[in-house]
Amino acid sequence: MVFNLRTFSFAESVEDDPTPPKTFSLKELRVATHNFRKDNIVGEGVFNIVYRGRLADGSLVAVKRARFVDQLSNELFEEAMKVGSTISRHPNVLCLRGFCRTKKELLLVYPLMVNNSLSYHLRERPDRFARPLDWTTRKRIALGVARGLAHLHNQGYITILHRDICSYNILLNEHFEAVIGGFALAMIMHEGNVEEGAIEWRTGSADSGSDSPSYQPYEDVYVDTDLCGTHGFIAPEYLCTGQCTLKNDVHAYGKMLLELISGQSILELNKLAHFQNLNPAEWIGNFLNKNELGRVLDPYLLGNYVEEETEGLVRLALLCAHEDPSVRPKMSAVVRMLESQSLQRDPSSRSSWSQSEYDSTPYYSFPPSPQGIAP
């Protein structure tokens, strides 16, 4: 089975050096958003409101405006600036175009993704007669997210943990190409915050309803950090230890694929799986093993998919969302699997893969602690 995704032209161009974000005046952004008019709101969060805007050059932008200016919002703003200023340009990663900072305003400016988010198209479309995502588009989204995440994990000497990969943070441009956004929780991994050692995680996750968990060590490099992320997408070892590795992003990617395939939220899949004391990956895996995958595929596909391809993508999702972090591949390996015939291989068989496609430790090097990156 071959996805033939190499023919997609969107996600190959990468610029090595990040372009410094532009400093916008408050007046420019007021004009762009018609003074932050309510009908220009395209999204709202706990800390921010996002407005649609048009700059003087005619380009469409999303202006992320902090609800309050306090210590926490300033810290979040500075972290967003650090990460945004560090990411080298990639067509599957949302770039920070600019910012505005005053005593009373904190504003971040991004290119506007006119087709909203993956979550919107899977579950939130107000117009139910709008055309749902077809199978070809879903394959392209799967590859685009994989390429973007692989870029974040290994862009030269910089490694970035996203920590919040989910369908809400996968944006879609005018061509329905995937663009990773939602960098509020992202972290730059560097010598000052990275440790290496055993992460003792609990087998038998809470999702699966196991009554007899056991503990198992996993060797990796990690950042010891407060637990954060979207419920349902956080890897079990991160939940247990607060030690976050790149495999947390891989796990979240696998869960996002399950949503992409089924059309249901991971929380809905959790509910369905819970009745059988399983987690969503185990539950869908049962249908795969019984050759009944059609029962969990998004009904909006209307049967218009290639059965061999859906099976391959489900196998990849289960591999990435595996409870054991040592089984999950690197995102660079995921890209290769999507671009080749590799999805035909049994994901439960480690013998099909080279060790380097799993191990994280030799995967990246870290820069010194950043100095003076914040604006």
Image: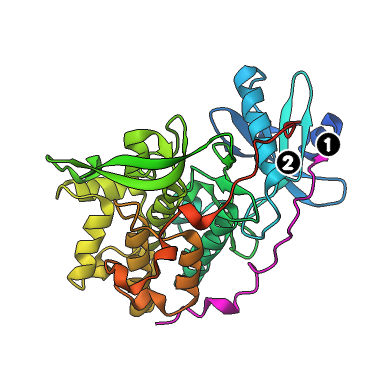
Front position in the image: 198 or 289: 198
| Image quarter hosting the C terminus | top right
Residue with the mark numbered 2:
109
Q: Which residues are magenta?
A: 1-23
Return the x and y of residue 170 as percentages of the image width and height.
53, 52
Mark 2 residue type: Val
Mark 1 residue type: Phe
Return the x and y of residue 78 as percentages of the image width and height.
68, 30
Is there any visible trace of residue 96 in the rendered image?
A: yes
Return the x and y of residue 243 as percentages of the image width and height.
41, 37
Return the x and y of residue 33 as percentages of the image width and height.
76, 38
Asked which quadrant contains residue 38, the reply is top right
Q: On the picture, is 143 further left or further right than 373?
A: left
Front position in the image: 288 or 131: 288
**Mark seen at residue 293:** none
Establish if 278 lies above or below 133: above
Q: Residue at x 68, y 37 (%)?
A: 82
Front position in the image: 123 or 4: 4
Q: Residue at x 37, y 47 (%)?
A: 219
Q: On the picture, is 289 further left or further right than 253?
A: left
| Image quarter hosting the N terminus | bottom left
Residue with the mark numbered 1:
24
Find out whether the residues at labels 1 and 2 contact each other: C-beta distance under 8 Å. Answer: yes
**Of helix, strand and loop, which one carries label 2?**
strand
The image's colour scheme reads: rainbow
Q: Residues within 10 Å of mark 2 (few under 14, many from 20)?
A: many
Decide whether the magenta segment is chiefly helix, strand or loop: loop
Q: Residues within 10 Å of mark 1 (few under 14, many from 20)?
A: some
Is there any visible trace of residue 62 in the rendered image?
A: no
